[in-house]
Image (tube, rainbow, N blue to C red):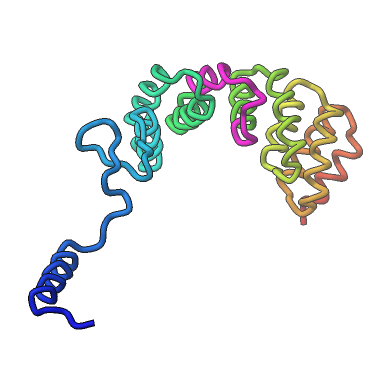
Amino acid sequence: MNRSPVCLAAVCFITALALLAGPRSPFAGQTSGRPGAPTVAGQEIPDWMARWELARVLSYAGRYEESVTEYSKLLREKPDLPKARIELAKVLFRQKKGAEALGVLEVVDVRQLDADSVLLMADLYRDRRSYERAAVLYREYLAKRPGDNPARLRFAEMLSWEKRYDESLAEYRKILAALPGDAQVRRKYAMVLMWSKRYGEAATELRRTLK
């Protein structure tokens, strides 16, 4: 079909305007309800979530004091965030504030703790000589991660401090089954044998660690 010169000129003009305008953003026209705050697909990141991410980033950067401040503000606003409490406890532990870290963890239901947090809590109770509480948590942790020999060693040592020698020796044997060449573990095992008056076995184990 023939087009008049005027129609052709109009088509060219409209096409040129469209090219100058560029492609339309898929998010154009979407707003958050706050003037000047565009969002992706209508979803806005709330302030409390932004503060949580800030607290995390500060902890990754080793800026622990600032991180603790932001976690504290977050938990004042959102007290029912067990994961944030766990993260705060870990930051406090890195600051060598064990008592404060334990206080934060004790607020959280044990069933909501991840394995690392259970171990951290066990270690903190051990350091504070709350051995019965620590023992329960060590057993729970090791049931899930039986191959964590450093954690099992700390548990075995703690049991020996309480003179629960048979239980301690059982834990040492599990470590030595996995690490038969570890002379230091074997020597500690021998010391527990000696404390339990099993002198012949202790001598045998000590001899195995010497050339």
Q: Residue at x 74, y 46 (%)?
A: 147
Q: Residue at x 72, y 41 (%)?
A: 145
Q: Between 71 and 62, which is closer to the camera in this rendering? A: 71
Q: Which residues are magenta?
A: 99-117
Q: Between 37 and 3, which is closer to the camera in this rendering? A: 3
Q: Position of residue 69 (x, y in %)?
A: 34, 25
Q: Between 71 and 156, which is closer to the camera in this rendering? A: 71
**Magenta stretch prevailing secondary structure:** helix
Give the position of the C terminus as an image quadrant. Answer: bottom right
Is 78 left, or right, of 115 in this rendering? Answer: left
Q: Is residue 111 magenta?
A: yes
Q: Residue at x 65, y 35 (%)?
A: 115
Residue that lies at the very extreme toward the front in this rendered image: 1
User: Does 161 appear above or below 172?
Assistant: above
Q: Position of residue 94 (x, y in %)?
A: 46, 33
Q: Within the image, what quadrant is residue 1 found in?
A: bottom left
Q: Residue at x 76, y 27 (%)?
A: 160
Q: Between 82 and 6, which is closer to the camera in this rendering? A: 6
